[in-house]
Amino acid sequence: RLTDDYGVASRLCDVRMTDRDSVTLLAGTNEISFTRTGEATAQNAQKLTYSATTVALDKYIATLVFTSEVIEDAAVNLWNDAAAEIARARAKLFDQLVFTDATYGILYAPDNGEAWKTLTVGAAITDFSADDAMDARYKVVGSVRRNGRYFMNPTVWNFLRQTKEATTGGYLFGGVGQSVTPTIDGVAVELVDILPEKGDITSNEPFAVFGDLSRIKIHVKRLLETKIFDSGVVKDAGGSDINLITQDSWAIRATLRCVPQTRFPEAFVIIGTGTVS
């Protein structure tokens, strides 16, 4: 089968195991500073302050059904294929949760005053330039900038990659016919298939991110649990019942419990067209 590539979030985020149903993250909200003072002059003490954010873990499930004939007659080992697809689905889920989920995703999470940073490239995706990307990088603090990366769909990178130099007309990113590792001003570009494709991006739409994914925690309680059943009733994709005994079938059920959590939303810049919010 032809599939997209997934796994950027699971590779770059801080994936942590937990034995709890909810998780609380503390985030420092201030800095200490030195004060010039004179001999025997008292100075006020300082305190470090923190904010606390709690999230509950969500449960996810995927169920596959096979008839005994499909398993017996298959030219490949369907159990191994199913295991590989379940692992791919988990990687896809993590990418969705981190980037595009309506509740947690960097691009579309509701703005509840978390101070997400934004950068608009203009009214349309065709206005996107290397200058915009570099401007986004310098919207975050230095500690984020050092380890930050760009995240965009391969079609968006391909558009940016074809930028021509004004003087010579050559490619801004590498020469003609050269293989180019995706980078902007020496900073890595991660190609994320789950992010919007160039042809689907309209006005007032976020499409790319700059930031350090290690600052996002993915809390996992049930890493990935799979069970095989040869009895019971499950529903197919259309909602109809399948009796595993009377219809001589098998089912694989995969479950996991997880939730992403961003400690510092201001460590990320959302790049988009028009009004970005």
Image: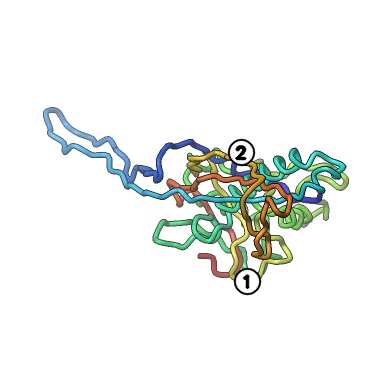
Q: Nearer the viewer, mark 2 or mark 1?
A: 2
Dot 2 corresponds to which residue?
11
Residue 275 appears in the picture as rendered: yes
- Name the residue at 55% across, 47% down: 211
Q: Which mark is residue 263?
A: none
Hey, what amino acid is under mark 2? Arg
In the structure shown, which secondary structural element does the residue marked by tag 2 occupy? helix
Q: Is residue 228 above or below residue 195?
A: above
The disc, 2 or 1, on the residue closer to the chain's N-terminal end is 2
Label 1 secondary element: loop
The residue to which callout 1 is attached is 203
Residue 31 position by quadrant = top left
> What's the residue type where badge 1 is placed?
Ser
Residue at the front extreme?
Answer: 246
Relative image position of residue 83 (x, y in whole percent): 70, 40
Residue that extends furthest to the top in the rendered view of this protein? 39
* CA distance for labels 2 and 1: 31 Å
Q: Percent from the top left, x then y, of residue 156?
A: 71, 57
Q: Position of residue 95 (x, y in %)?
A: 61, 49
Q: Decide if residue 185 is in sight here.
A: no
Q: Is residue 74 left or right of residue 160?
A: right
Between 238 and 32, the one nearer to me in the picture = 238
Residue for point 58% across, 47% down: 94
Q: Is residue 41 left or right of residue 201?
A: left
